[in-house]
Image: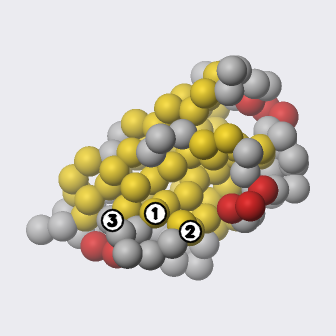
């Protein structure tokens, strides 16, 4: 009964900020790799950021390094993505995903479970 539910998406102006949340249930949150992907209209799915199971390794796509910060709260079983200095090209459906494989935190094919996504629009 793995469940991932994203929230926090919406409209932001260029240079603005949003904080996405992913509420997880049905698995041992602290033992799974977990992170964020995004689907840009007209393009494929991109792996944005992720943690391995114990948080000792973190991945960021080059396009978001220095602007986005991933974090997790094991007590709340919640994953976050703080997005600062937003750009129009960040507009996408952002999806939370997880895997029981600890080494799968940095790429799409390693993910086993997916949320439905939350839409982020960056525009004037």
Is there CB contact under 8 Å for labels 3 and 1?
A: no
Residue 29 location (% of width, % of height): 74, 30
Q: Quadrant of residue 50?
A: bottom right
Mark 3 neighbour density, 10 Å: few (under 14) some (14–19) many (20 or more): many
Residue 2 image point, x, y percent: 68, 27
Which of the pair 66/93 is nearer the observer? Answer: 93
Horizontally, residue 111 falls left or right of residue 66, namely: right
Give the residue number, with chain letter if any, for mark 2: 46
Residue that lies at the very extreme toward the left in this rendered image:
124
Inter-mark Cα distance, 3 to 1: 9 Å
Please tell me whether mark 3 or mark 1 is closer to you in this view. 1
Image quarter of residue 17: bottom left
Q: Is residue 32 left or right of residue 84?
A: right
Of the image marks 2 and 1, the number of the one nearer the N terminus: 1
Q: Which residue is mark 3?
A: 91
Label located before the other in sequence (2 or 3): 2
Q: Earlier in the sequence, mark 3 or mark 1?
A: 1
- The answer to the question of whether label 2 and label 1 lie on touching residues, with beta carbons closer than 8 A, is yes
> Looking at the image, is 53 positioned above or below residue 75?
below
Describe residue 105's horizontal placement relative to residue 72 as left or right.
right
Give the crowd class for mark 1: few <14, some 14-19, many >=20 residues within 10 Å: some
Q: Which mark is residue 24?
A: none
* x then y, percent, for residue 78: 59, 31
Residue closer to the observer: 19 or 9: 9
Q: Which residue is mark 1?
A: 39
Residue 80, above or below 27? below
Q: For the residue labelled by badge 2, is the local secondary structure a helix, a strand or a loop? A: strand
Q: Is residue 55 visible?
A: no
Q: Residues within 10 Å of mark 2 (few under 14, many from 20)?
A: some
């Amino acid at each position: 009964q793995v469940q991932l539910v994203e929230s926090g998406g919406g409209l932001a102006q260029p240079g603005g900020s949003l904080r996405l949340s992913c509420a997880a249930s049905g698995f041992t949150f602290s033992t799974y790799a977990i992170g964020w992907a995004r689907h840009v209209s007209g393009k494929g799915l991109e792996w944005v950021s992720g943690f391995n199971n114990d948080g000792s390794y973190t991945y960021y796509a080059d396009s978001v390094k220095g602007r986005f910060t991933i974090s997790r709260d094991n007590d709340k079983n919640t994953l976050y993505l703080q997005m600062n200095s937003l750009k129009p090209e960040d507009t996408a459906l952002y999806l939370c995903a997880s895997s029981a494989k600890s080494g799968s935190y940095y790429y799409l094919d390693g993910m086993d479970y997916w949320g439905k996504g939350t839409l982020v629009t960056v525009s004037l």
